[in-house]
Each structure stands twice: as C-alpha cells, then as structure tokens.
Amino acid sequence: MELDWSIFFAQFISGLCRAMVLFLMASGLTLVFGVMRVINFAHGSFYMLGAYLAYSLTSLFATTPGSFWIALILAPLAVGLLGGLVEYLLLRRIYGKEHLLQILLTYALIFIFGDLVKMLWGVELRIVNMPPILSGFVALAGQEFPVYYFFIIGVGFAVAVGLWLLLRLTTLGKLVRAAAEHRSMVEMLGYNVNGLFTIVFMIATWLGGLAGVVIAPTVRLSLSMDMDIIIECFLVVIIGGLGNIWGALLAALITGELYSLGILVLEKYAMAFLFGLTAVIMILRPSGLLGRGVN
C-alpha cells in the first residue's frame, strides 16, 4: 500500500503540537523535582485550574477584544500565586522527609482541587472560544492545519528558550541550579533557600496553568483532564530524566510524535507505544535520556 506522505506530515504537525503541551507541563514537573526533590502528583490540577480560569476570564471579558489574551496572562499568574501559597503552607513542612509523605500530600491535593473545580464550575463540560485571529487554517503539503496548532508550537519553543535564558543568564537561575546541586552551600552563603523554593514552585505551577490556558480552546474542559495529562507527563519526565529541562523537551518531542504517528499503525493502542518506550528506557537507562540535573 502506497504511503500517503501528506497524512504522515499532518500527523507529524499534530504530534509536534501535542509535544509542546506536554513540554509545558513536564518542564514544571521536572523543575520541581530537580530543585526541591518533590514529586508533585497535583501538577495536573494546576493545569486544570488554568483551563477553567481561562473559561471564566474569557466569559467575563467576552465583550472585550482580546479576551483570550487577557486569560493567557491572568490565569497562569493566578495559578502561580496559588502554587506559591501551596508551597508555603504545605510543601515546606515536608522537605527532607520520605517521598511517601510527598506523594500522599500531593495526591490529596488532587481531590481537594477537583472538588474546588466542581464547586466553582460544576460538572458540565466547558468550552473556551478560539481567539478570532487564530481561528483560521494554513495549507501545507496538501493538508490544512489550524493556525492555533502553530501558536501552541510557538509558545512551547518560546518557553523552552525562556527557561534556558532564565536558568543560564540570570542570578535567580544560577541560584536555582546551585540549590539543585548543593542546597546547604547556598544556605551557608546567606540566601533564603525556602524563598527560592517558593519561587521555583510558582514558576512550575505557572507553567502548568499556561499549558491549561493554551490547550483550553482545543478541548472540552472536564473534571478528568488533570489525570488525563499527568500520567503522560510522568512518562515524559521518566524518559527525559528527572530534573532535566532539556530532557523534558526531548522526551516530549519523542512521545508526542510517537503517539501521533502510532495512531497510523494501531489507532486504539497508540498509548501502548509510550508505555513500551518508557519500559525500555527504564531498563536500559534508568536515569533517563539526559540524566538528572537542572540545566
């Protein structure tokens, strides 16, 4: 059977779009682990909150031109502030303790945030309107692609570059990398490590909220969307290497394309390819493709 390259290209673009959303999520997840050594199971909840806040803000400013862009700015900021509050009130009390306590606490937050969303927005499916400027299509290689796909791809790569600049060229980034390797040394130099951890967690949850806002116009918002993505994000983090931003980007690109192209082979079992790859990585390279470390 002759391969239709236009369909292959269409799946490639779709996979790239999926990969960027996964990277936005996984970068925050791996940043928290790399610096704070916390496994945050509730990271998907911040993604869900970002999406629902985008729905509320776009509805509130429905008559205002650029309502989506208002949501794109305000919703992740609100999620980031909530993340800072969670870190200050809860996570700070369990640093240095066994990972089981971290898992129990962050897993409990999933139910708390889930009930909060149910109380505020109900159980009905919600829809965020596509911004008019991004609602068209682009013709490439005999296929038409939503302009919004390329917006998502652009946001993902922009965030990757932004994180690299933050971690490499700013004082905050250097402190974050130092704290990831030698927390006690940073404390002895007189820096407030607890405050640094709060900032890191706020950045991570801001990324989760940003991913929720970005994906919101392409899906129906539901109470299960946090769990739908967090499993795949953990696969990305394991494949890329816990604590490594570039590993998260590489793994997101691999898993996004593997899932999208896997649909062409076995549509109903495309997710199995991701679990298979994760199993191979864990056996052959347990530390992930790019090891561990915030860089």
Image: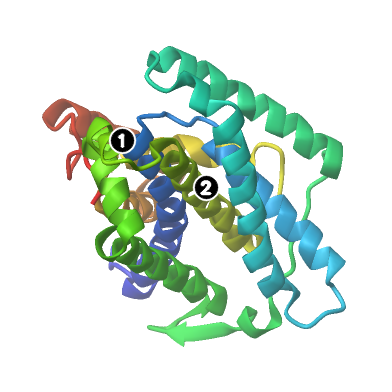
Q: Earlier in the sequence, mark 2 or mark 1?
A: 1
* Mark 1 residue element: helix
Relative image position of residue 248 (x, y in whole percent): 31, 49
Residue beneath the point at 77% across and 30% down: 115
Task: Give the image quarter of residue 2.
Answer: bottom left
Q: Is residue 122 visible?
A: no
Residue beneath the point at 69% across and 33% down: 113
Residue beneath the point at 43% across and 69% down: 153
Q: Badge 2 is on which residue?
A: 202
Residue toward you, 193 or 55: 193
Relative image position of residue 173 (x, y in whole percent): 32, 55
Depicted 4 relative to depicted 266: above or below: below
7 vs 138, left or right, is left
Task: Give the image quarter of residue 106.
Answer: top right
Task: Give the image quarter of residue 123.
Answer: top right
Relative image position of residue 75 (x, y in whole percent): 67, 58
| Numbered circle sitting on residue 263 | none
| CA neighbours of label 2 inside 10 A, class few (<14), some (14 to 19), many (20+) | many
* Mark 2 residue element: helix
| CA neighbours of label 1 inside 10 A, class few (<14), some (14 to 19), many (20+) | few
Depicted 45 relative to depicted 106: above or below: below
User: Which residue is farthest left?
Assistant: 284
Relative image position of residue 262 (x, y in whole percent): 35, 50
Residue type at tag 2: Met
Disc 2 versus disc 1: distance between alpha carbons?
20 Å
Q: Badge 1 is on which residue?
A: 187
Residue type at tag 1: Glu
